[in-house]
Amino acid sequence: MSFDYQHLKSAAFSGILFMSVYHVISSILQSAFLVSFFFLFNCVLSTLALLAVNKPKLDHIKLTLSVMLLSSFSLYIFLLSHLDTPNVTSIWFCIIILCNSVLLSSSLAFRLNLSIIISYWLIIVLLSNKSLLHIESALTLTLITLLISMLGQVTRNLVNQLELSIKTDTLTGCIQTDEFKLELAKVTQLFDRYNTPFSLICIKYDSAFPSESEFEIWIKELAQLYQSRLRKTDILCRFNSQKFMILLPSTPYKNAETLCSDLKKCADAYEFSYQKAANPHNINTRLTFVTETYSDKDTLEVWFQKLQSK
């Protein structure tokens, strides 16, 4: 089961659009044409934002912020004309605060929601003739804002962790296989267009640790060791349970072979945790290295399969 954050954003914009349409009709029926104009304009912006949600190439930040600011301003105009019934307006503010937490970054949503709460309190206290009667709605709105802000932060953290787990191996921190193949396709396109060379190093490992936990410590240390020897542009992948793959963009065979030799030496010289133990186990670990530079003699798929079979 996958979580699509875009669907949540679409639901938030739909909520803003519904609120705007409702207040356009309500304001016209009450002959409050100025208020209806602001909400009508917000209907247009909300519709544009809703249509742009599934277009990743567009910059949504300015449009989203414009929608939320106009929604808040329109509601304040509505509140000023309905100071005798602020409890009804506070419900709509709750919707805006919730949508802010979904559509905006955590810091921006918090600042905007805080400004909404402060402005609401000022209007209730300074402009309402029955401010004491409306304290309950202000307190409720404040509490709901705090809860929504905390839930929004937790949700974003969970989404970030989910996206990170999809792209990286949780044990070693290396890039996942699917992401590695995407990067491999990118350097292949550069090769086809500009003849820019790239190389791969395949490292097959075999071990016989007495426990899974000891193996995990060893493979994690091995990945960290290799990563420390690579450039920022190089990509280390735990391709499966038996091999690492290292993608070396803009690297001819001679340079790749030099790096491969360096990786062999550093792995032989490094003292792993199982070797530092008071009673170290007599464990055989075997690493096999294969280096290849891509050429257009074979297709990428055929070349990649030959590399793995060596």
Image (cartoon, grey):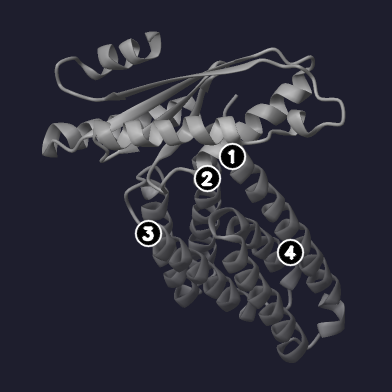
> Could you classify mark 4 by the number of other residues whose Cα lies within 10 Å: few (under 14), some (14-19), or many (20 or more)?
many
CB within 8 Å, label 3 to label 1 = no
Q: Amino acid at mark 3?
A: Val
Q: Is residue 205 above or below residue 98?
A: above
In primary-sequence order, the first of circles 3 and 4 is 3
Q: Is residue 205 above or below residue 254?
A: above
Disc 1 is placed on an element classified as helix
What's the distance in space between the residues labelled 3 and 4, CA to CA?
Answer: 27 Å
Which residue is at the front of the view, 165 or 42?
A: 165
Disc 3 is placed on an element classified as helix
CB within 8 Å, label 4 to label 2 = no
In primary-sequence order, the first of circles 4 and 2 is 4
For residue 208, what is the image quadrant?
A: top right
> Could you classify mark 2 by the number of other residues whose Cα lies within 10 Å: few (under 14), some (14-19), or many (20 or more)?
few
Disc 4 is placed on an element classified as helix
- Could you tell me which residue is drawn at 34 percent across and 15 percent down? 307
**Residue under pointer 1:** 224
Q: Nearer the viewer, mark 1 or mark 4?
A: 1
